Amino acid sequence: MAGPSLSLVIAAYNHGRYLSGTLDSALGQTCPTEVIVVDDGSTDDTPAVLGRFAGRVRVHRQANRGLSAARNVGLELASGRYIAFLDADDVIAPTKLASQAAVLDADPDVGWVYCDVLIDDEVTGERRLASERFRYQGRRLDGWLFPELVHGNFIPVMSPLVRREALAAAGWFDASLTPMEDWDLWLRLSLVAPARYLAEPLATYLVRPGGLSRDRARMERCRFLVLDKLTRTQPEALRELGARGRRIVADMHNWFAAEAGAHGDWREARRRLAASVRTVPWQGRAPRMLALSTFKAWCS
Amino acid sequence: MTGVSAAVVSYNTRELTLRCLRATEAAASADTALILVDNGSRDGTVEAVRAQCPRWRVLVLPDNPGYGAALNRAFAAFPGAFHLALNADVFLEPAALGTLCDFLARTPASALAGPALVYPDGRPQPSAKRLPALGFAVAETLGVHALAPSSAAVRRFYYGDRVFDRPTAVEAVSGAAMLIRGDAYRAIGGFDEGFRMYFEETDLCRRLHAAGFEVTLVPEARAVHWHAASSRQTTVRQVEYYVSYVRFLTAHRGRAAGRLLAGTVALSTALRMLGLVVKYPPVGARRTVLGEKLSACRRLLAALARPAPVRP
């Protein structure tokens, strides 16, 4: 096959300080890899750093549109059969892509391979493996991941290597779900292709101060936005989970009902609670809250 | 966030789509994100675009989720300061996109700008419309407007009583071509995906007004619109049209108005079913034609009986 069969998509926005370490690790792979950097309108020394790597990486510079859009652009530019993502402050082990590609080469039914990741928290100084932090022992890590993933993301964005066809079937990153756009994409991927887990820490994920993943309230809201989208776009997949799926959907509606109620939007609260009670009729507070919100909506 | 994201939605209109993409590309600048969303065309649109229009990123949605949902996904993947939404049968004039962008950039009160649309032979096309009120919708459903297409009410509805020679605030613009301010679009949560076809743009304009923005027709920007090239008026499409109409009116004028329109649509549909039996007597080959049309009518009645909840 002509050209490298591996593409690595790196989205960079004002990460000049970290970028050369990331690029060194990307270019140090033991197998030929096409490295694509999408500079999302950086205003720091990112272009200068990229200049030092000229000729060895493909650079696409664009007006600032956000991380997801930058990754989507990279995805479109990538020519490899297998594609991986990297953020401009993460590093990967030299054998990461080769080991993962070997799995995809060996088994054409596997759509994506992910690995363990060392999560390096710059603020707390804590270094933990993703397998510890997300309790991989109790999980089903191979095969169709949807029933496992639906409870929450346990795969950092730099972890998987994905077959191009699987990505094409799953679609792009959805920027309206930042910072959980990776979870949203993995959920879609988990419905089109089975996955395989490699129990080796092959990447380091740097958690920096002020990063998006720190904002608790926003993360929680985003989590429910992802589930709301899932309820709208993949109702059958959730239905197949049976009572567990219904519970997830009902909890999601209850959360949005509480949010709407807090803003005094009783019509929306009533709509959400009605949907919740339709999904799971026997639950603690939702039926009472439905009666209350119907009354409040009627009064307002 | 900077830059323009342009999204074209296509469905089985390959040649028109290719012309549309070339015209859009010519009107776009170098950093415009160009996205084609294809709702599962079976005429080779996707392959032709990949081969002939390399700047365009293609998103295939085989489940055909509708026009608004297709645009939402494109703009979620490539958000920008301005979002251009185009039907595949609209050809922008080269300066049109720049004109619309300049207008929104210097007019913070306006969140959405539409160009003046013309037919391929240069005749002007209605490019702006009002938000339909209950009486207008009921009259349309009962066929009053079809009987008197040049009545004062219809003319007023499409701003036929006005000459647009400068940017003018209107109630809604045609959904065929719109430039939407990205922040405002995100603030109101994008298109309501409950509309599968028709009225999604009217509803967007309505919610932009509710959020305190203006909607503007900018006649200096022009585009050719091959009206109805991708939407032949079949019985099936009429089902979509009326379901959306009721949904829109419920959101716009309240539940009672929605119910009243639904009742009127149901009544006229029942009459229509009677008429269909007379027009296509169930003998020979006509039986299948009649069956298809009647089942579309039944679907419409079923959809009217259980309306989906709407966004306020």
Image (spheres, rainbow, N blue to C red):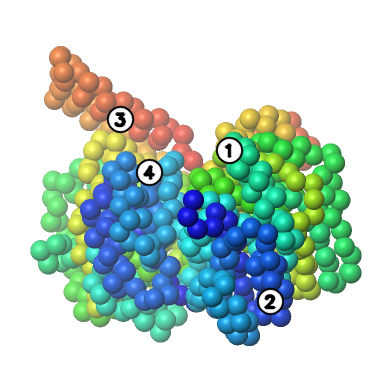
Q: Which mark is residue B40?
A: 4
Residue sitting at x 22%, y 44% = B232
Tell me the CA gap for discs 1 and 3.
47 Å
> Which image quadrant is residue A121 in?
bottom right
Q: Are marks 2 and 1 in contact (CB under 8 Å)?
A: no
* Chain to which mark 4 belongs: B
Tag shown at residue A20:
2
In the image, residue A135 above or below residue B204? above
The verdict on a common chain for dots 1 and 3 is no
Q: Is residue A228 left or right of residue B61?
A: right
First along the sequence among labels 3 and 4: 4
CB contact under 8 Å: marks 4 and 2: no
Q: Amino acid at mark 1?
A: Pro
In this figure, which residue is indicated by the disc labeled 3?
B297
Q: Secondary structure at mark 3?
A: helix
Chain for disc number 2 = A
Residue B275: where, in percent of width, then height?
Answer: 18, 27
* Residue B77 x, y percent position in the rendering: 51, 60
Res. A77 in view? yes
Count the numbered circles shown. 4
Label 1 sits on residue: A108
| Mark nearer the N terminus (2 vs 1) | 2
Q: Residues within 10 Å of mark 1 (few under 14, many from 20)?
A: few
Residue at 75% across, 40% down: A141
Q: CA distance from mark 2 to mark 3?
A: 64 Å
Identity, as a three-letter code, of the amino acid under mark 2? Ser
Task: Say whether mark 4 and mark 3 are on the same chain.
Answer: yes
Q: Mark on residue B103?
A: none
Kind of residue indicated by mark 4: Gly
The type of residue carrying mark 3 is Cys
Residue at 24% across / 64% down in the picture?
B91
Question: In this view of the protein, which residue sits in the foreground, B291 or B128?
Answer: B291
